[in-house]
Image: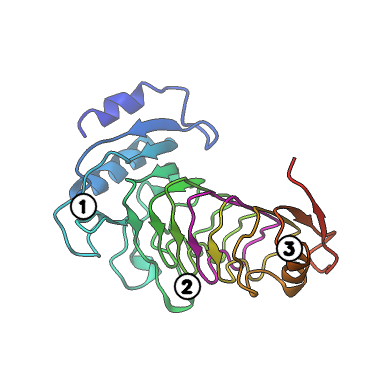
């Protein structure tokens, strides 16, 4: 941890904008103390960081409310329960990318009406990689874009509820996307690269473009009825399904390029 500040100071011209973050790779034990120290350093440097924690090890803590990566692989970025005003914002706005260990599970957010996520203040995050993104983790964080990494298997209920996302790509390893996972965003384009199970995750989004693989096992409520009927009429054929606008029931199909 002592080498981080000198390392970051080497990047005089990088990290000024979110488009050019400084890469930071760490392989420490991700205890609460180390995580909080890291956030303090990022706040002090005040530059945007692409943070790779994939080689970090777990702490000995069994407490879900302890910060960092606990013994059960739960990663808590700074939420002990209670109101959103109890979540410290130190350093978090500067993190643009977060690559967690392959077994990591993100800490759940506040579950009632997905009121707020445990990742509050990560407003410039555009990439997340973990084994599981838990219920309401990123609810109402204010995300404008998010790339979901290849390690993600499950996406919990309300995981990205009420953000500003416009485009979602679900990678080939995703097995389950739960109800309301992406509800109340501005998603127009959805790309599904897997045969996962989808339980109405895109409710209240103005999607007009769905790229999908063959025989994806969608629930009838995964998408609007007009798409589900059209998809079944095409024998669940993979390809690109589009409609002229979000109010239209007139879908068309074309093969993948």
Residue 45 disc label: none
Residue 235 disc label: 3
Nearer-the-camera pick, 53 or 192: 192
Of label 2 and label 1, which has the lower sequence position? Answer: 1
Residue 54 appears at what percent x and percent y? Answer: 32, 41
Look at the image and tell me in which quarter the C terminus lies. Answer: top right
Of label 3 and label 1, which has the lower sequence position? Answer: 1
Look at the image and tell me in which quarter the N terminus lies. Answer: top left
Specify the farthest residue to the left: 60
Left or right of 85? Residue 145 is right
Closer to viewer: mark 3 or mark 1: 3
Q: Is the C-beta separation of discs 2 and 1 under 8 Å?
A: no
How many C-alpha atoms fall within 10 Å of the one at disc 1: few (<14), some, or many (≥20)?
A: some
> Label 1, on which residue?
32
Q: Based on the displayed image, in which of its 4 quarters is residue 187 positioned? A: bottom right
Q: Based on the displayed image, in which of its 4 quarters is residue 242 positioned? A: bottom right
Nearer-the-camera pick, 154 or 78: 154
Q: Based on the displayed image, in which of its 4 quarters is residue 249 positioned? A: bottom right
Residue 103 appears at what percent x and percent y? Answer: 31, 51
For residue 95, above or below residue 119: above
x 54%, y 65%: residue: 197
Q: Secondary structure beneath disc 3?
A: loop
For residue 235, above or below residue 97: below
x 28%, y 30%: residue: 5
Q: Secondary structure beneath disc 2?
A: helix
Residue 227 appears at what percent x and percent y? Answer: 75, 67
Q: Secondary structure beneath disc 1?
A: helix
> Label 2, on which residue?
114
Residue range corresponding to the magenta coloring:
167-193
Of label 3 and label 2, which has the lower sequence position? Answer: 2
Q: CA distance from mark 3 to mark 2?
A: 36 Å
Residue 195 appears at what percent x and percent y? Answer: 56, 57
């Amino acid at each position: 941890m002592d080498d981080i500040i000198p390392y970051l100071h080497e990047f005089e011209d990088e990290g000024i904008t979110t488009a050019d973050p400084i890469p930071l790779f760490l392989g420490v034990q991700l205890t609460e103390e180390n995580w909080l120290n890291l956030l303090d350093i990022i706040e002090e440097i005040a530059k945007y960081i692409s943070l790779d924690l994939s080689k970090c090890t777990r702490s000995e803590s069994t407490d879900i409310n302890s910060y960092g990566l606990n013994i059960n692989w739960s990663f808590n970025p700074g939420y002990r329960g209670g109101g959103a005003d109890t979540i410290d914002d130190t350093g978090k706005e500067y993190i643009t990318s977060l690559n967690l260990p392959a077994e990591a599970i993100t800490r759940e957010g506040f579950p009632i009406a997905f009121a707020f996520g445990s990742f509050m203040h990560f407003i410039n995050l555009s990439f997340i990689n973990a084994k599981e993104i838990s219920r309401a983790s990123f609810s109402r964080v204010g995300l404008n874009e998010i790339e979901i990494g290849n390690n993600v298997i499950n996406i919990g209920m309300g995981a990205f509820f009420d953000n500003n996302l416009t485009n979602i790509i679900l990678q080939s390893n995703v097995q389950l996307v739960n109800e309301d996972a992406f509800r109340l965003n501005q998603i127009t384009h959805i790309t599904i690269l897997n045969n996962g199970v989808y339980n109405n995750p895109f409710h209240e989004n103005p999607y007009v473009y769905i790229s999908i693989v063959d025989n994806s096992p969608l629930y009838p409520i995964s998408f609007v009825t007009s798409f589900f009927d059209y998809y079944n009429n095409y024998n669940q054929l993979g390809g690109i399904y589009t409609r002229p606008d979000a109010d239209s029931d007139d879908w068309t199909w074309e093969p993948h390029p």
